[in-house]
């Protein structure tokens, strides 16, 4: 009985290696996954975002709040996504107004004086996604920070507003592009 030996030539090995490399390449290219550490899930056809100036319609007006909120929302998209920020008519568009800005006592002591006060900011946001209108929303976001009544609002206002705006921007961003 004669045993047949299979021999593989160098040219056959090169052909198999070439096909394997092409196959792996096609597999990698066809399996595109959009992932972001921010949790943002943005469709690949969305390329731009615009943030209109948020008008301040609150009864008590902080003169820097409109600019701060608008700029921080733009910065969030610049730092957390690859979208281009455009002045208007972006694929994602944000508009709205500051509806409330108030300081209230929250912890009344026995002598009827406040132990703590609360600064609250409310923002109405209209979000439009021109590529997927099912994700549009028009809703109000609220956040607050408490501070001791032994401090005047003028002493802590800048710090509190910065903290509140950070929370508002995070909520607005997540509501628009995060799939939690």
Image (cartoon, rainbow, N blue to C red):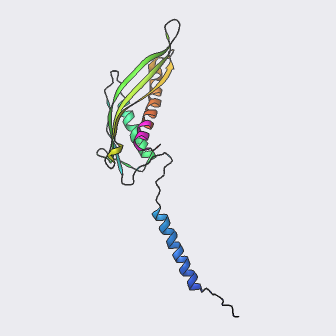
Coordinates of residue 124 in the picture (x, y in percent): 34, 31
Q: Quadrant of the N terminus?
A: bottom right
Q: Is residue 126 visible?
A: yes
- Dominant secondary structure (helix, strand or loop) of the stretch shown in magenta: helix
Q: Is residue 62 visible?
A: no
111 versus 13 height, above or below: above
The residue shown at (47%, 68%) is 26
The residue shown at (47%, 27%) is 159
Region in magenta: 171-178
Left or right? Give the position of 140 relative to 20: left
Left or right? Give the position of 33 relative to 70: right
Residue 24 in magenta stretch: no
Residue 172 in magenta stretch: yes
Coordinates of residue 153 in the picture (x, y in percent): 45, 19
134 versus 23 height, above or below: above
Coordinates of residue 67 in the picture (x, y in percent): 36, 33
């Amino acid at each position: 009985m004669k045993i047949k030996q299979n021999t593989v030539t160098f040219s056959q090995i090169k052909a198999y290696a070439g096909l394997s490399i092409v196959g792996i390449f096609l597999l990698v290219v066809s399996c595109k996954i959009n992932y972001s550490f921010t949790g943002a899930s943005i469709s690949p056809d969305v390329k731009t975002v615009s943030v209109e100036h948020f008008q301040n319609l609150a009864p008590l007006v902080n003169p820097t709040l409109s600019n701060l909120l608008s700029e921080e929302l733009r910065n969030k998209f610049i730092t957390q996504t690859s979208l281009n920020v455009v002045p208007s008519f972006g694929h994602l568009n944000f508009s709205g107004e500051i509806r409330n800005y108030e300081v209230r006592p929250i912890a009344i002591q026995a002598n009827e004086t406040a132990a703590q006060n609360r600064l609250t900011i409310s923002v109405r946001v209209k979000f439009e996604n021109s590529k997927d209108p099912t994700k549009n929303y028009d809703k109000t976001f609220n956040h607050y920070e408490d501070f001791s009544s032994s401090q005047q609002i003028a002493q802590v206002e800048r710090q509190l507003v910065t903290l509140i705006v950070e929370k508002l921007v995070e909520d607005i961003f997540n509501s628009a592009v995060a799939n939690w």
